[in-house]
């Protein structure tokens, strides 16, 4: 199973880019993983939030493949421990899906069309984080999940 992390826009924060790349490289030892950085919507500052979500949503939906699963990183999603996230990935691998997309949305969240296409939502925390940090957090959790599934010592209970 290929895990693809979709993000809206590129990060200008070096720490986020370096941290995300570090954990994605580590996770790549276990399974194919990649980041799909979708370009920011042009003139996004002139659009109302609903219209911006629609434009970002179109870009997200364009990169999905028909037999993939889409999970949104959303504050209203299901909160998982690292062990439960590892179980979640294992379950998805066991189903035989080819691609699992995890999406970090834009500043205003997701469009209705993206919510409709999603198989579910995952919350990283009840706290709100900047998108640059979310990239690092989810990349690290993907890596951590694989070490848990392999019984490697990275994760300590």
Image: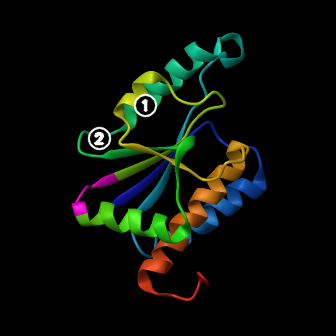
Question: Taking 124 as reference, is 141 above or below it?
Answer: below
Q: Which residues are magenta?
A: 95-99
The quarter of the image holding the N terminus is bottom left
Name the mark on residue 3.
Answer: none
> In percent of the image, x 46 and y 28: which residue is there?
59
Q: Position of residue 68 (x, y in %)?
A: 29, 46
Q: Report, in whole angstroms, how far the alpha carbon at label 2 lies from the one at label 1.
A: 16 Å
Residue count near mark 2 (Cα–Cα under 10 Å), binned few <14, some 14–19, many ≥20: few
What residue would you read off at disc 1? 115
Q: Position of residue 20 (x, y in %)?
A: 63, 59
Q: Is residue 113 magenta?
A: no
Circle 2 — which element? Answer: loop
Residue count near mark 1 (Cα–Cα under 10 Å), binned few <14, some 14–19, many ≥20: some
> In percent of the image, x 59 and y 67: which residue is there?
23
Prevailing SS of the magenta stretch: loop
What residue would you read off at disc 2? 65
Question: Taking 104 as reference, is 137 above or below it?
Answer: below
């Amino acid at each position: 199973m290929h895990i693809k992390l979709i993000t809206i826009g590129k990060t200008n924060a070096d720490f986020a880019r370096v941290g995300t790349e570090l954990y994605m490289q580590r996770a790549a030892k276990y399974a194919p993983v990649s980041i799909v950085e979708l370009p920011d919507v042009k003139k996004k500052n002139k659009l109302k939030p609903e219209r911006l979500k629609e434009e970002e949503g179109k870009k997200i939906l364009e990169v999905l493949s028909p037999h993939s699963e889409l999970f949104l990183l959303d504050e209203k999603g299901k909160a998982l421990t690292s062990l439960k996230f590892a179980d979640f990935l294992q379950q998805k691998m066991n189903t035989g899906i080819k691609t699992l997309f995890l999406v970090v949305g834009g500043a205003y969240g997701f469009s209705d069309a993206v919510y409709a296409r999603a198989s579910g939502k995952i919350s990283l925390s009840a706290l709100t984080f900047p998108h640059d940090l979310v990239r690092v957090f989810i990349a690290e959790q993907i890596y951590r999940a694989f070490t848990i599934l392999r019984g490697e010592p990275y994760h300590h209970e």
